[in-house]
Amino acid sequence: MIKAGSAIYRAPGRYGRVHASAAERSLRTVMTIDWSGRTVIGPAGKPPLELAARRYRDPVTLVDDLRRCADASGGPLARLDAGGDRFGPVAAILSGSGGYVSVRQRDHDGYTVPIWAGDELEAWGITPRLDDIVTTMRSWQAGHAVQALTEASPYLTTVDQQTAVDILWGLLSGNSDPHVSAIVTAGAAHPVLRAQRPWISHATLHLLHPGDPAGSTRRGLAFLPVDEARFTVLVYGGPTGPVQDAETAAATAAAAASAW
C-alpha cells in the first residue's frame, strides 16, 4: 500500500508553502513563474462590478486584490496567500483543515478555480471575476458542502471520477518543473496513461488507478527522475526499472498500467 502524501506540494525551493515567506515573494521567484494573464478588479473599496483588464506578474498582487474585494463585500478571507499546490504554482490559495481552494491564472480568459476536499478534487470552474472567487472562498471557508458551493457560485460544477482525471492532466500542463514536464508530455500521449490519475509528490509524477483513493493506492506507478530527460519506472510493489528516456518510460508504464 502506497501512501501518496500530504495535500500540499512542498518541494524545497520550488513553488513555496501555502503561506509564502518574504523570500518566496522575491523578484527571483516572480521571474521564475510566469503569472501574466487577465484579471478583473474594480475601484478600491467597491465590488468589481465593472471589469478592467490587468496583468499580474507578481501573484501577491492578485492575493491583495482578492483581500480588498473580500473586505469590501462582507468580510475578510483567512489563510489566503500565494504559493503552490501539488500540481504546480498557483496565483492564490485558501487553505483549511479539510482541503483548499486554489486559483490559477489562465492566459486570456480569467481563472481556473479547483475545490479540494483533502486530496480529492470535488468541483471546479472558470471565471473572469474576482467577486466570483471571493464568494466561493467565503462559502468554502464557512464550511459549506460542495453542493452549496455550486449553488452559491454557478460557474462551479461538481466532477465525477473521469472528469477529475481529465482536469488533473490539464492542471499538470501548466507545471514548469523541468523534472516533470518531459514525462507529463510523453505520458499524456498514451491513452492508457491518460486514463490514470496523475499525482505529483516530491517532484515525481505518479499515475494512480482512478478507482483507488488518492491516499491509499494499490495500483500505481512512479516515474523516478534521473535528470530532466531520463526516468526509471517503478510499478508499486515491484522493482525499479532501467533508466529510459521519457517516451520509452511512458511506453513501459503504459504496458504495466494495461494490466490493472
Image (tube, rainbow, N blue to C red):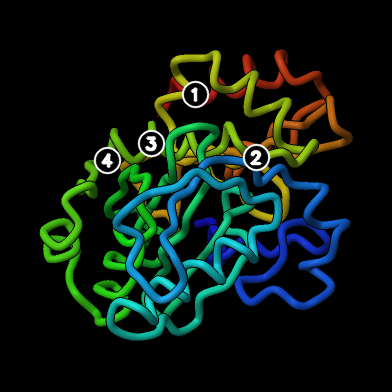
**First reached walking from the N terminus: tag 1 or tag 2:** 2
Query: What residue is drawn where x is 43% and y is 42%?
Result: 110
Q: What is the secondary structure assignment of the residue under circle 2? A: loop
Q: What is the secondary structure assignment of the residue under circle 4? A: helix
Point out the frontmost of discs 3 and 1.
3
Quadrant of res 224: top right
**First reached walking from the N terminus: tag 3 or tag 1:** 3
* Amino acid beneath label 4: Gln
* Amino acid beneath label 2: Asn
Q: What is the secondary structure assignment of the residue under circle 1? A: helix
Q: In the figure, 93 relative to 174: above or below? A: below
Residues at marks 2 and 3, CA–CA distance in whole angstroms:
16 Å
Please give the residue where the numbered disc 2 appears in the rendered image. 175
Query: Relative to the observer, which residue lies in front, 159 or 69?
Result: 69
Please give the residue where the numbered disc 1 appears in the rendered image. 193
Q: In the figure, 70 relative to 106: above or below? A: below
Q: In the figure, 5 relative to 54: above or below? A: below
Please give the residue where the numbered disc 4 appears in the rendered image. 161
Residues at marks 1 and 2, CA–CA distance in whole angstroms:
18 Å
Where is residue 118? Give x, y as percent.
Answer: 39, 67
Q: In the figure, 101 relative to 222: above or below? A: below
25 displayed left or right of 210 = right
CB within 8 Å, label 3 to label 4 = yes
Query: What residue is drawn where x is 39% and y is 51%?
Result: 113
User: Which numbered dot is residue 165?
Assistant: 3
Residues at marks 4 and 2, CA–CA distance in whole angstroms:
22 Å
